[in-house]
Amino acid sequence: MTNWLPNLTQGGGPLYLRLADRIEHDIENGVLPEGAKLPPQRNLAFDLGVTIGTVSRAYALVRERGLINGEVGRGTYVLERAAAGAVPAERRSPPASSPLDGTRELDAAAEKLRFDATAAPDVGQGETIAALSARTNHAHLQEMTSYTRTYPEHWLAAGSRWLARGAFRPSARDIVPTLGAHAAVVATIAATTSPGDHIAFEHLTYSQVARSASLIGRRITLVETDTHGMVPEDLERVCAQRHPKMVFLMPAAQNPTVATLPRERRIAIAEIVRKHNVWLIEDNLYGALAADPQPVLAELAPERTFHVGGLSKSVAAGVRGGWIACPPNYARRVQVAHRMLTGGLPFMLTELSAQLVLSGEADAIREKCIAENNARLALARRALSGYSARMSANVPFIWLELPEPWLSGTFKNAASEEGVLIDDADEFKAGRSDRVFHHVRIGISAPRSREETARGLSVIRRLMEEGSAGYDSLD
């Protein structure tokens, strides 16, 4: 389609950015179908009356967006829709891999050791929760028989108390109780963005959020990270080029890399999102466990940050308790979105979550979970001695670098064959990426005992020592 000529008279900003946006627009609307050949850069520059550098920058930007590809001697072509991943859902043919697909073994055999989960360990909290549930149910017999139509003040007070960190003390009027932290994040995305909007993620993160965002029509864009977490300079680039509406971050004990953002990066990120008018979701699930002295992002950018937390990693995953601290005047909007997406809060679980927090039982259970996590981390340090394993006090997972010649997916399969379930790096990829991570995440809180933990860790060490030559995937 070498006779295609875009109109750049509309819109603002640099010409190269207007041209890139027009190319993306015409690809998404079928004007430039998959496989179409874009005009040679020199020809298009002449036809538009711009420099070849302008066209070159625009083509490079659209290539970064994953929509086109160019080869020397062949020209520049629109990628297939499944490869581009940016065509509106209503016009996209079913891909081989969709947001509904996952890599977890959901129906894993009962005899396998579960190192692929990070929920709060069993520290005997079941008895406490059962007793509190019985008292709560008996005290609210009438409320248990109908829909939850109002949010009692103590539900909001519980969220304010649980989410408080350092100098951050969210107001109860800005709290939204939710059916766990995942529902909190998805409700926030639905309430503040529209289909087609970009949401920025780290290359590796809690990918279920990215998949959920894709499922409701949002587009994923990736930001570079290093050992300290998100790189502010690359976030600045992404904001300037892709104009995301929101950034999802886990600043403390990031899942899966265990990275914790330094104070100066948090300040820089707060300034960047403020400059570019971008929302922030701060997932602090693991931050409730981590010994992190840094200020939370909600303290640095309170007018732009939705701060999310819950009970799944610190108390009990089955309670499904979660809360969002919203920027002023946004709680009602997020509350409505949460109800539309989930059908509403169950009174029993929400009341139980509030009572756990307000009674102090949640804090007591969290301390026991931290002690158990640290005991298991001590086992891991001994079992994985000599290998590069990132871990952090109190946090129930390890980011293990695999020795040569192991690949992440192959190692996961080998461990499964040996009866140990772990997560490979692909499980945490927020979107299509050519980055390769030779790591696996090992959750240490799900095994039923320290003995099981030690047994699974010994299997993992033996596999690393044997190398991939000791693993045969053929029957």
Image (tube, helix red, strand yellow):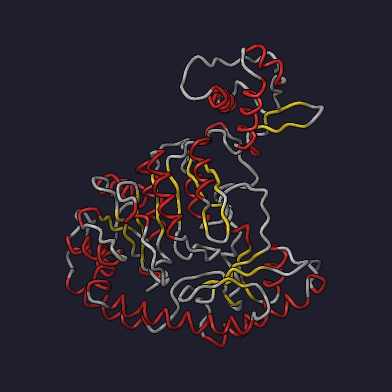
Residue placed most toward the observer, 59 or 211: 59
Residue placed most toward the observer, 119 or 346: 119
Q: With respect to residue 257, does 124 lie above or below?
A: below
**Residue 333 picture quarter:** top left
Q: Is residue 208 left or right of residue 157?
A: right
Q: Is residue 23 left or right of residue 236?
A: right
Point out the residue furthest to the bottom here.
Answer: 451
> Where does residue 10 sit, x and y in percent of width and height?
47, 16
Quadrant showing the N terminus: top right
Q: Is residue 465 left or right of residue 112?
A: right
> Where does residue 43 sit, x and y in percent of width and height?
71, 15
Q: Is residue 134 left or right of residue 116?
A: left
Residue placed most toward the observer, 227 or 100: 227
Quadrant showing the C terminus: bottom right
Q: Identify which residue is drawn at 67% across, 16% down.
A: 44
> Where does residue 121 sit, x and y in percent of width and height?
45, 78
> Where does residue 220 sit, x and y in percent of width and height?
53, 43
Point out the residue furthest to the front here.
Answer: 264
Q: With respect to residue 46, does 294 lie above or below?
A: below
Residue placed most toward the observer, 129 or 196: 196
Q: Identify which residue is drawn at 50% across, 76% down.
A: 445
Tally the marks.
0
**Residue 470 picture quarter:** bottom right
Q: Identify which residue is drawn at 53% across, 33% down.
A: 88
Q: Identify which residue is drawn at 51% across, 82% down.
A: 448
